[in-house]
Image (cartoon, rainbow, N blue to C red):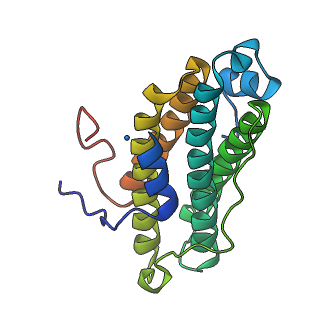
Amino acid sequence: MTDRTPTAPASPARRLFLFESTALSLSGVAVALLAGTPRLAAGSNAEAANDIRILNAALAAEREAVAAYQVGAESGLLKKPALQTATQFQGHHKAHADVLAATIRKLGGSAAEPPARYDFPVDRLRSQSDVLQFAAKLERGAVTAYANAIPKFADRDLSHAAASILSDEAMHWAVLRQVLGLDPVPGAFFA
């Protein structure tokens, strides 16, 4: 089956995360990050600063996803059960953002503030399918971004937490592809 997911340029937050890096139920690692582990304090200042930069890029992307799902939910184009799924996924992104912001603060950084507004292609969202394709494109971008970020963290606990979030993003992408009538897992390897 051919992938019909549109390929539009990545948004500034996704591009930043991709460049920096080139759940409602939180994993044990995410909970440990929030609690603060001794390992988080270890490492050089340069390594911590780099980890904070990557985390802030991820935070920006998660906040963008929250805003995008809000646009979809408020569009009036999503019907049950797609609307329920979208709001559930939005909740996951809110949880990711909360964990990322708390982790940045625990590392001694400042969580970046979200922009006043996002530039989403709302003029091209005319049907439920359009909204779901837009969401699928964002989720695919998140999978790529987290996959690229994982090996770049100096703190391996952060890599593990990013892998946990990546798993959630991949599930979102697969579910959205399935709802769109596409093969949910189009290949044995992510490309």
Q: Residue at x 73, y 34 (%)?
A: 103
- Residue 135's place in the image compared with 88, above or below, is below
Residue 55 image point, x, y percent: 61, 40
Q: How many marks?
A: 0
Q: Residue at x 25, y 63 (%)?
A: 4
Task: Depth check: give the residue in front, 113 or 141.
Answer: 113
User: In the visual, does 179 lie left or right of 40?
Assistant: left
Note whether residue 101 is visible: yes
Task: Depth check: give the residue in front, 138 or 77.
Answer: 138
Residue 72 image point, x, y percent: 57, 71
Residue 102 image point, x, y percent: 77, 38
- Residue 31's place in the image compared with 88, above or below, is above
Q: Residue at x 66, y 40 (%)?
A: 23
Note whether residue 175 is visible: no
User: In the visual, does 55 lie left or right of 26?
Assistant: left
Based on the displayed image, in which of its 4 quarters is residue 1 positioned? bottom left
Task: Depth check: give the residue in front, 68 or 100.
Answer: 100
Q: Residue at x 64, y 17 (%)?
A: 43
Task: Depth check: give the residue in front, 1 or 156.
Answer: 156
